[in-house]
Amino acid sequence: MEKSELKELKLFAANLRKNILTAVYSGKSGHPGGSLSIADTLTYLYNKVMNIDPKNPNDPDRDRLVLSKGHTSPALYGILAELGYFPKEELTKFRHIGSFLQGHPDMKGVPGVDMSTGSLGQGLSAACGMAISAKVTGSDFKVYAILGDGEIQEGQIWEAAMFAAAKNLDNLVAIIDNNDLQIDGRLRDVNSPYPINEKFEAFGWHVIDAVAHDFDSLASAFAEVEENRGKGKPIAIVQCSIKGKCVSYMEDRAEWHGNAPNKEQYEQGISELDQLIKEIEEE
């Protein structure tokens, strides 16, 4: 990847993380840890992979994204605001009475949200429906679903995985955000879904490994996705990530799954991200 391109992506991701913190702090509740762990993935998807148009969010030919782990809505709202789907000022109203930015994505109220999600395990089924619809109608749009690694403990995920392979949904990409933490702690201590790769392979998927916070790794993963389009298999990217990435006191800490920072913590997080932006600009 060219140095200038990499720099642009890093800066975008850092600003997205500021949006996430601002939303959760403003709402005095929310899920910052898992939102921060997918910030780089969303940055790459929306800037380099997906066919989207913020000026025409309902374009029938657009690619779709289903945030199956819907509690990480601050990340989705943050990137939609950064891209101009709605004013960034709206992020300060997150979870406020009367705001259209609810705690979980609402496709009827938020421009750019393709599926209402929040009840874990259901998003992949919805994504399968979108993907098979594209097949039936002869449409070219692609469908991307972001799943939590704790979420894949849900049985409905594996029903959808079986269905996707049975129906040859090679226009569907599931991205499993493997930060190894859920609300109650380490995955293996709660209800281990490991080995994730082998499970999806056993269900008939083409599986790709990626490092979530390395844009070269993401570029390689999505290049492999394109190489495997049209080969009859749904595709799963299992990405190793860090919960709370780029905010020091949140990194790899289960307690930041669903807690909001106080004023001091918020200011520290923004300061750290501003310092990161400064370092990126000086590269």
Image (spheres, rainbow, N blue to C red):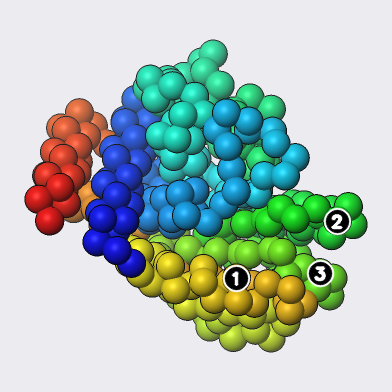
* Callout in the foreground (3, 2): 2
For badge 1, the amino acid type reads Glu
Contact check, label 1 and label 2, Cβ < 8 Å: no
Decide which of 190, 224 is in the foreground and name it.
Answer: 224
Q: How far apart are labels 1 and 2 at the CA level?
A: 18 Å
Residue 225 vertical position relative to residue 73 in the rendered view, above or below: below
Q: Would residue 193 be visible to someone looking at this image? A: no
Residue shown at 39%/25% (left/top)? 88
Q: Quadrant of the C terminus?
A: bottom left
Where disc 3 sits, the SS reads helix
Q: Please tell me the numbered disc located at residue 113.
A: none
The residue identified by callout 2 is 138
Q: Amino acid at mark 2?
A: Gly
Name the residue rendered at 31%, 31% in the picture.
Answer: 22
The residue where tag 1 is placed is: 226
Closer to the chain start, of discs 1 and 3, is: 3
Asked whether the residues under the numbered discs 3 and 2 touch, taking CB atoms below 8 Å apart as contact, a structural biologist would say: no
